[in-house]
Image (spheres, helix red, strand yellow):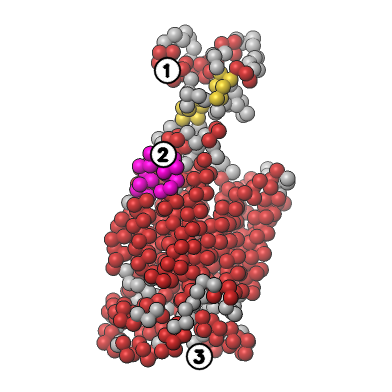
């Protein structure tokens, strides 16, 4: 693994890595707001049918002065399922008999009502405008709101499939720059969408770019960081998502109009697009692709930023050719995406790591739906999700360095699953205990996400790393799309959804025991490196840290 030695020479954890971390993780915080924005921009406000007696000044002129808004509401809107004013129906004609103190609340028939043919009136005390109120995504059209979220998640799934392979072919930094621009333009355009289908289209384009940013950020950080600092850097990257949750709640609390909120969370990516041109391309990828001169320039630039002047002068094309001869020779054989499943040593890694990604996405959305059902304040809930994530991910960093990748991955997934399964035994009356278990499970999933992000990058070689990460992101988004459908099982048994939500991470965590440990190992560059590692493990058994270091695997 000659590149690891080159990286140590130019500095694997110095001023360059700090600057790179800031430049890449700040966009991750704003990216999280794009993913969580529809918790606020698509919030469903209280609503009722538009009726002349309440909403038409001409009709109000003929109403006796003794009648107040509450009386007019009574004669205009029938009671709903919870004895509140019905949200989707109104009386065809005012039912004045309902004001008779000797009458009954049921002194009317269903035939006397009709749908909201003149539209709806929305409560704007919390949000001045949402996409639900703008395009009337209520009553018979209520299914369009979750459809918008599903379209967004589908966009991330497609983006992971596309940009994983594109990045392996054209480079990490170039694709990342394009993704920043795409997110900025599409997000801004969504704020001015004239119709709901156009809004969904632009949100789909935003989601495509979101997938590319997440994958390329993770890979650039990993490929420019030394082995000993990799867990720290990737944990900080993961914390960007946690702080993004808090940022989302803060921005949404101050901006209550959906279009303005969409603009506020999209505009920063224009700045990201501008400064991304100064980011360094992955020298590891450049060298493996045979672009020695470009790789040399990037290494010299990093050495200069890290203050390694002596190394900068000794780095030459001849030195790189000599150091990377074995890797360059092995990389001449093209590595296709099919190699992830067909190559000995990679097939099992691909299946198990993809299963771990799926379990994270599937169960996270299951728990999120349960938390929303608790009826907490929407802004407080958003902050809580982010705050719980922070200590969980910091604790993951400690576990990754002490227990290793495999043990941490197993423990985090199994813990999250057991918390969900435990809620099957807790009565619904004990809301505080159910909430505590849900939050604990959410923390376990935060740890699982941090671990799988690091683990996936370490399991696969440079020539296929982005493709493998993209496959994992696809699996996570597929899980997110399928997760809500499991709630339909509740019609056959109240505990069935919890059983499925809990069993998936537990089984996935146990499957992770089949993966090799990668702690303290340099990143593999070629498929041959992975196969050599598997051969050495079979020959010598599980190596310790000292043996790993001496063999460069």
Q: Nearer the viewer, mark 1 or mark 2?
A: 2
**Is residue 517 visible to us here?**
no
CA distance separating discs 1 and 2: 27 Å
Tell whether label 3 touches label 1 (CB within 8 Å): no
Q: Is residue 140 above or below residue 159?
A: above
Which residue carries the number 3 mark?
550
Question: Upstream in the sequence, badge 1 or badge 2?
Answer: 1
Question: Which residue bears the numbered disc 2?
Answer: 195
Q: Residue 14 in magenta?
A: no
At horizontal 65% and vertical 69% (from top left) the residue drawn is 511
Q: CA distance from mark 2 to mark 3?
A: 62 Å
Residue 399 image offset from top left, x and y in percent = 55, 71
Q: Residue at x 36, y 85 (%)?
A: 9
Of label 1 and label 3, which has the lower sequence position? Answer: 1
Find disc 1 in the rendering and name its residue: 56
Rendered location of residue 473, percent (x, y): 51, 62
Q: Position of residue 523 (x, y in %)?
A: 47, 79
| Main secondary structure along the magenta-highlighted residues | helix
User: How many C-alpha atoms fall within 10 Å of the one at disc 1: few (<14), some, or many (≥20)?
Assistant: few
Quadrant housing residue 508: bottom right
Residue 268 appears in the picture as rendered = yes
- Nearest the eye: 98 or 175: 175
- Which picture quadrant has residue 83? top right
**Is 496 rendered above or below residue 13?**
above
Q: Quadrant of the N terminus?
A: bottom left
- In the image, is residue 511 above or below residue 434? below
Query: Which residue is drawn at the image coordinates 64% and 9% (left, top)?
Result: 102
- Specify start and end residues of the magenta stretch as a single range: 187-202
Q: Residue at x 64, y 73 (%)?
A: 513
Left or right, 63 with respect to 280, comes to: right
What is the C-alpha distance between the residues marked 1 and 3?
A: 83 Å
């Amino acid at each position: 693994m000659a590149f690891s030695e080159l990286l140590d020479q130019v500095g694997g954890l110095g001023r360059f890595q700090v600057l790179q971390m800031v430049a890449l993780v700040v966009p991750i915080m704003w990216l999280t707001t794009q993913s969580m924005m529809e918790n606020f921009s698509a919030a469903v406000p209280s609503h009722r049918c538009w009726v002349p007696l309440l909403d038409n000044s001409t009709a109000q002129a003929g109403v006796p002065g003794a009648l107040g808004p509450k009386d007019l509401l009574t004669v205009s809107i029938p009671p709903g399922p919870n004895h509140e004013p019905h949200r989707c129906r109104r009386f065809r004609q005012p039912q004045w008999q309902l004001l008779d103190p000797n009458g009954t609340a049921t002194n009317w028939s269903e035939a006397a009502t009709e749908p909201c043919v003149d539209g709806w009136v929305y409560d704007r005390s919390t949000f001045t405008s949402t996409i639900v109120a703008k395009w009337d995504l209520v009553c018979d059209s209520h299914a369009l709101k979750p459809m918008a979220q599903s379209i967004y998640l589908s966009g991330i799934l497609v983006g992971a499939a596309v940009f994983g392979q594109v990045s392996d072919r054209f480079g990490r930094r170039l694709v990342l720059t394009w993704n920043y621009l795409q997110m900025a333009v599409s997000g801004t355009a969504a704020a001015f969408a004239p119709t709901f289908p156009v809004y969904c289209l632009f949100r789909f384009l935003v989601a495509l770019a979101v997938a590319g940013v997440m994958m390329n950020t993770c890979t650039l950080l990993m490929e420019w960081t030394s082995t000993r600092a990799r867990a720290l850097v990737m944990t900080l990257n993961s914390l960007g998502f946690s702080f993004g949750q808090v940022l989302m709640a803060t921005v949404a609390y101050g901006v209550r109009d959906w279009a303005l909120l969409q603009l506020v969370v999209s505009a920063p990516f224009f700045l990201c697009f501008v400064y991304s041109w100064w980011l360094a391309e992955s020298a590891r990828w450049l060298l493996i692709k045979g672009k020695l001169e470009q790789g040399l320039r990037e290494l010299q630039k990093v050495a200069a930023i890290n203050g390694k002047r002596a190394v900068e002068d000794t780095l030459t094309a001849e030195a790189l050719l000599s150091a990377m001869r074995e890797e360059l020779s092995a990389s001449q054989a093209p590595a296709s995406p099919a190699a992830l499943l067909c190559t000995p040593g990679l097939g099992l890694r691909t299946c198990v790591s993809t299963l771990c990604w799926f379990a994270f996405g599937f169960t996270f959305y299951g728990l999120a739906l349960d938390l929303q059902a608790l009826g907490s304040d929407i802004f407080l809930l958003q902050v809580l999700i982010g705050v719980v994530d922070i200590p969980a991910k910091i604790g993951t960093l400690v576990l990754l360095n002490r227990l290793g990748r495999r043990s941490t991955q197993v423990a985090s997934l199994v813990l999250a699953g057991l918390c969900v399964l435990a809620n099957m035994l807790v009565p619904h009356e004990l809301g505080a205990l159910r909430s505590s278990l849900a939050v604990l499970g959410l923390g376990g999933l935060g740890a699982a996400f941090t671990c799988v992000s690091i683990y996936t990058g370490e399991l696969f070689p440079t020539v296929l790393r982005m493709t493998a990460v993209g496959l994992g992101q696809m699996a996570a988004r597929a899980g997110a799309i399928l997760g809500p459908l499991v709630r339909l099982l509740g019609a056959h048994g109240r505990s069935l959804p919890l059983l499925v939500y809990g069993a998936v991470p537990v089984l996935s965590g146990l499957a992770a025991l089949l993966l090799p440990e990668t702690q303290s190992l340099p990143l593999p560059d070629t498929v041959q490196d992975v196969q050599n590692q598997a051969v050495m493990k079979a020959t010598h058994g599980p190596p310790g840290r000292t043996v790993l270091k001496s063999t460069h695997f």
